[in-house]
Every structure is written in C-alpha cells, then in structure tokens.
Image (cartoon, helix red, strand yellow):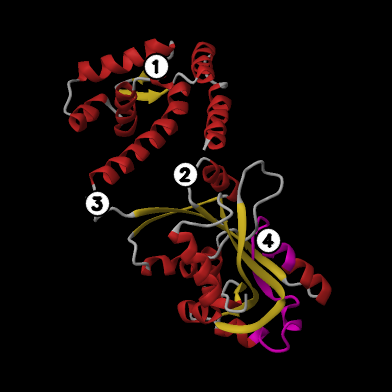
C-alpha cells in the first residue's frame, strides 16, 4: 500500500512542478512532511469542483443550495491559502487557469472515490457488494473481454463490476495504487516497468481470417496464398499479434494489401463487415464473429497466436472475481490450456 501511495505522490509532484512557483513550493513542502490533514480544506475543494463541473457559480449554487457569496468566498480562501488563481473571468464566463486545470483531475478522483465510499457505507450488511474493478487494455477484442468476465456474473457472492478501457501502462499505474483489482491484456507485465504485479496466462489461440461473402468468393480459395495482394485490415502496431502476423506473412512470402490499421478490434470488425477488407480475429470466437457480423471464414492458422493475461498485484489470487475469470478461461474459453 505504501508503494502505491509513493507512486501517487510522485505523480502528483511531477504535475504540480509545472504550476506556479509559490503553489509548487507550498504543496511540495506539505507532501514532504505527509501533513495531509492540514494541507487541504476539502469543503473548499468540493466547491471548486462543483463550479468547475457546472461551469458557473450560479449553477453551482442551485446544485449545492448555497449563496454565491458562500461559494465564491470559500474558493477565494482556497486560492489565498496557496497563492494561486483557480479561475479567471472571461466576459460572463469562468474559465479554469492552468493551476485549476491541474487541480481538477485530482478533485475528480477524490470525490468519485468519496461517492463510492458513501454508497458502500450506506448499504445494509446483507446488500453490500464486493467491488471488482477491471482494467482492459484497449487492444483486447471486446468479445474476448466479455467471455472472460462473464463467469463473474454467476457467482453466489454479489459483485459490482466496473470496467475501464485504456492503454496498458496507464492501467498498470492504477493497479499499482490499488485503483484497479485486475488488468486484462494481450501481453504479460512489461519487464521495464517498476511496478509490482503478477501475470497469469489465461490462454492462447490461433487466428482466423474473415470476409464478406463477396470478398470470400474472390479470396477464399487456396488459403493462405490467396491473401497475396488481398485487401487486409490489421491490428495496430501496439498489439502483440501484429508483429506475429507480419512475421508469418514474411515466412509464407505473402504480401497482402494493407488498407487499414486499427487499435480497436471492434472498429476493425465494423470495417470488415462493410466489405472494406479481410480482417482477423481470435479463432476461439470465430463462430461468434461469423454470427454477429454476417461474414464468412476464409481460413485459420495456429502459426500465429493471440495470448491473453490477467495481471494483478497478488501472486496468490484471493478476489472471487479474479478467481472466476482465471478458472472460467481455462475451463470454458481456452479449454486446451
């Protein structure tokens, strides 16, 4: 837990170093002493947050049921404490200053967590759900994500699942400070990141090639040679399968005509459904892709594989949601692992 707090403080320091010098000196001094109780008046910060979200003091007054004098006065005290300006007036509108823009995302996180805490505390003991926060690397196909997470919906223990999609490194940073319980990725924990985490391989499978009926009639014979010169939609360079696919093409002396690159597999499949080109997907969900997008299978290969991993901060998994995902993947989705 201390490691996670240290990472958050380092991230906070790096951001505020770009702010005004006096603001920076005061905050760094308070962070250095760990004096968080005296560092911030959270009521004042809450007023700032509501004004920033609503766009005006008038709308903030309606939401908070307070007078304009109270809100503006408290925000002024917050600004005076650190010698900064959080807003500037442009005509009749309020705009965030640079210090205000840097402060807002921290306020967002704090009050979002506060809201979740309040819901948890107000819940009756027999109604309390186990929170399961899952981060999904944006390169993982959505159908795979659903199939992996689906077993958690059948648990006897009630879970409240939150899923967030983002780049892997940002998800791992949140995992390190315990804002996530699990990250699902197409690669294990990168060795160059100084973050504590453990990777469990959920499974792997070959890839399949799909196309509309028109393209399948033209390029579906003599696979994989038929891919030479064929219009192809491929995953983006950040995906692991991209390099494996290119290596396989080189080995087979096949040179398709690349017409699109996509980090988002769902977007690639939408273009494939429209007939823009042949596209690939994990063979384990081939039947689902054919049914959902109305396309045809023109070939498969196990020489190119896609792998999927569950990354958590615990070597020995205890969270029921993570256990359900890992066991479900091996027993139902990737049955050969």
- Of residues 318 and 170, the one drawn nearer to the viewer in this rendering: 318
Residue 221's place in the image compared with 5, above or below, is: below
The residue that label 1 is drawn on is: 38
Q: Which mark is residue 125?
A: 3
Measured from the top left, where is residue 24 in percent x and y?
53, 16
Q: Which residues are magenta?
A: 218-244
Q: What residue is shown at x 43% (from left), y 13% (from top)? A: 82
Q: Is residue 145 visible?
A: no
Mark-to-mark CA distance, 3 and 2 = 23 Å
The residue that label 2 is drawn on is: 179
Disc number lying in front (2 or 4): 2
Secondary element type, mark 2: loop
Q: What residue is shown at x 51% (from left), y 20% (from top)? A: 31
- Of residues 253 and 196, the one drawn nearer to the viewer in this rendering: 196
Q: Earlier in the sequence, mark 2 or mark 4?
A: 2
Q: Earlier in the sequence, mark 1 or mark 3?
A: 1
Secondary element type, mark 3: loop
Mark-to-mark CA distance, 1 and 4 = 47 Å
Residue 205's quadrant in the figure?
bottom right
Label 4 CA crowd tier, 10 Å (few <14, some 14–19, many 20+): some
Secondary element type, mark 4: helix
Residue 236's quadrant in the figure?
bottom right
């Amino acid at each position: 837990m201390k490691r996670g707090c240290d990472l958050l403080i380092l991230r906070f320091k790096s951001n505020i170093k770009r702010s005004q010098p006096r603001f920076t000196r005061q905050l760094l001094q308070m962070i250095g002493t760990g004096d968080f109780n005296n560092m911030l008046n959270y009521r004042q910060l809450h007023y700032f947050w509501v004004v920033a979200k609503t766009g005006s003091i008038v709308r903030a007054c309606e939401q908070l049921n307070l007078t304009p004098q109270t809100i503006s006065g408290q925000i002024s005290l917050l600004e005076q404490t650190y010698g900064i300006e959080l807003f500037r007036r442009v005509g009749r509108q309020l705009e965030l200053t640079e210090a205000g823009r840097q402060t807002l995302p921290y306020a967002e996180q704090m009050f979002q967590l506060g809201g979740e805490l309040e819901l948890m505390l107000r819940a009756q003991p027999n109604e309390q759900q186990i929170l399961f926060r899952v981060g999904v690397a944006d390169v993982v196909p959505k159908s795979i994500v659903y199939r992996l997470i689906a077993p958690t919906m059948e648990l006897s223990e009630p879970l409240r699942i939150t899923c967030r999609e983002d780049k892997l490194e940002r998800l791992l940073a949140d995992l390190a400070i315990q804002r996530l319980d699990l990250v699902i990725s197409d690669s294990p924990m990168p060795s160059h990141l100084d973050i504590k985490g453990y990777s469990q391989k959920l499974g792997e499978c070959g890839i399949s090639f799909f196309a509309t009926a028109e393209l399948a009639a033209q390029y579906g014979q003599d696979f994989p040679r038929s891919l030479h010169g064929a219009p192809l939609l491929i995953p983006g360079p950040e995906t692991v399968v991209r390099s494996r696919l290119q290596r396989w093409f080189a080995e087979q002396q096949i040179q398709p005509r690349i017409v699109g690159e996509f980090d988002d597999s769902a977007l690639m499949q939408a273009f494939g459904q429209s007939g823009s080109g042949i596209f690939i997907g994990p063979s384990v969900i081939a039947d689902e892709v054919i049914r959902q997008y109305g396309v045809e299978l023109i070939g498969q290969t196990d020489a190119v594989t896609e792998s999927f991993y569950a990354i958590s901060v615990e070597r020995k998994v205890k969270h029921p949601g993570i256990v359900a995902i890992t066991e479900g993947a091996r027993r139902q989705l990737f049955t050969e692992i």
